[in-house]
Image (cartoon, rainbow, N blue to C red):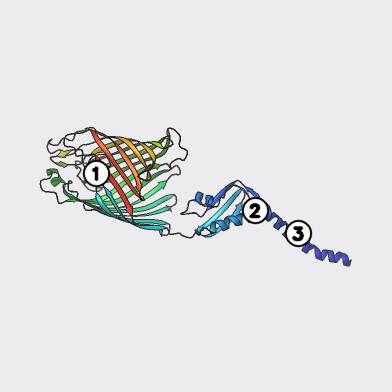
Amino acid sequence: MAVFLNLQRAAPAVLIAAAAGSVFVGSLQARPYSAVEVRGAEFIAADDIAAACEVVAGEYDSSDMSAVQECLMSSGQFRSVEVRGEGATLVVEVSELNDRPGRVEVGLAYDSRDGATLNLYFERYNLFPGTFGSIDLRFAEEVQSFRTSLYHADAFGDLDFGIDTEMRKTSYSDQGFVAKRVLVEPYLALPFASGGRAELGVGYRRDDMSDVAAGSSVLFGREMGVIDAPYVRLGVSYSSNPSKNGGAGFVTGLSLSLDQYFWGLGTDQKTYETRIEADARFALAEKTSLLVGLRGGIVSGQDGHNTRAVDRFFVGGADFRGFAPRGIGPKDGDWFLGANNYYVTSVELQREIDQLLGTTGRVGVFADIGSAWGLDDTLGGTVDDGKYIRSSVGVSLTLDLGNIPVSLFVAKPVDYRDGDDRQSFGISFSTSF
């Protein structure tokens, strides 16, 4: 009887020890995981986190999980890291240390349209909880602008919310007037997993056209004044990530956008505007690509209201190589009036080069073709607003010189009209400090 009682008392201790031993042995046994999932990554790409410590599907035991955790923590990027198994998935859950990344940049840029431009740029993620914010200030002799942006992803379920503002003034010497614009636009955006996106914006715009130059077009004098009114914007876009696979004829990049504006709502000065942009890149060989692009727009006054110069399109410069900024379209004497319609298509063959002036770059040959036409008021038929085709051919070069991106082109107009403002050379560069 005494022996039986002693065994009975000893049984729980034996069972506990056996269970502990089983747990210990189990912890040393590796388990297979067919997938890896990184959670909590907001600003560092999940793929980069997994690649940093070579976290791939396979067998892991507790010591392997601890090693992954120690590896990621040693990067100094995370407040905490937890590695665990959930069924057939190895879960890596992180909390990023820098949850408000951002940057402040002061820069200097130059291009053939705006000349030298000073730039101040600021951006920050989580400026407010879950909200990205940016400020972009640009100052040049003939153009000044101030833009801000706030963007909150998943603000209303699957809908994102943003607010854009802009203040801009232009006084180009060949413009013939001073243009000032103030714009505020809150909008909703619906992203699609495929890379598509739809937007609805309801905003307010104030356009002031003043200080018409002496001797410029009579049309500018008729159009000067202020229009301020609400508007609606509908937009759809698509953008694909560049493919890493390459291959002859393969589309390695594609972007499309279509925006429809309804300006001047609630007034007798309504104007409707459509803008379209499309770009595609094809990999023809390992270092050779074909670029195809299209830009176009239509603006029309409604209910007898004529468009104004601040509404119309002024085409040229980098938008249409071979012609100066504001260098084609309807013209009154020496003054280009802008156009109600325009399009420019471009085809360019680019080749990457390993060394030129001590750096890598791209050289290209291109052909641009397009037109700018149409006015509501032709000053009694004295202004020719017909649709005339222009075209140009040329070569381009893009380099990084001392971390300064430099783009330049040389173009020769092929089809043009007498009175077009032709420009054979263009250059742009930017740097920050």
Mark 1 or mark 3, which has the lower sequence index? 3
User: Which residue corresponds to the image point at 39% horizontal and 39% vertical from the top-left?
Assistant: 352
What's the distance in space between the residues labelled 2 and 3, CA to CA? 21 Å
Q: Position of residue 250 (x, y in %)?
A: 43, 34
The quarter in which the N terminus is drawn is bottom right
Q: Residue furthest bottom?
A: 2
Q: Secondary structure at mark 1?
A: strand
Q: Residue furthest front?
A: 358
What's the distance in space between the residues labelled 1 and 3, CA to CA? 83 Å
Residue identified by numbered label 2: 61
User: Looking at the picture, does residue 106 appear above or below residue 248?
Assistant: below
Marks 1 and 3: CB-CB under 8 Å?
Answer: no
Q: Residue furthest right?
A: 1
Is residue 180 something one can see in this rendering?
A: no
| Mark whose residue sits in front, 2 or 3 | 2
Marks 1 and 2: CB-CB under 8 Å?
Answer: no
Residue identified by numbered label 3: 18
- Amino acid type, mark 1: Thr
What's the distance in space between the residues labelled 1 and 2, CA to CA? 67 Å
Q: Position of residue 6 (x, y in %)?
A: 84, 66
The quarter in which the C terminus is drawn is bottom left
- Amino acid type, mark 3: Ala
Q: Which mark is residue 335?
A: none
Residue identified by numbered label 1: 271
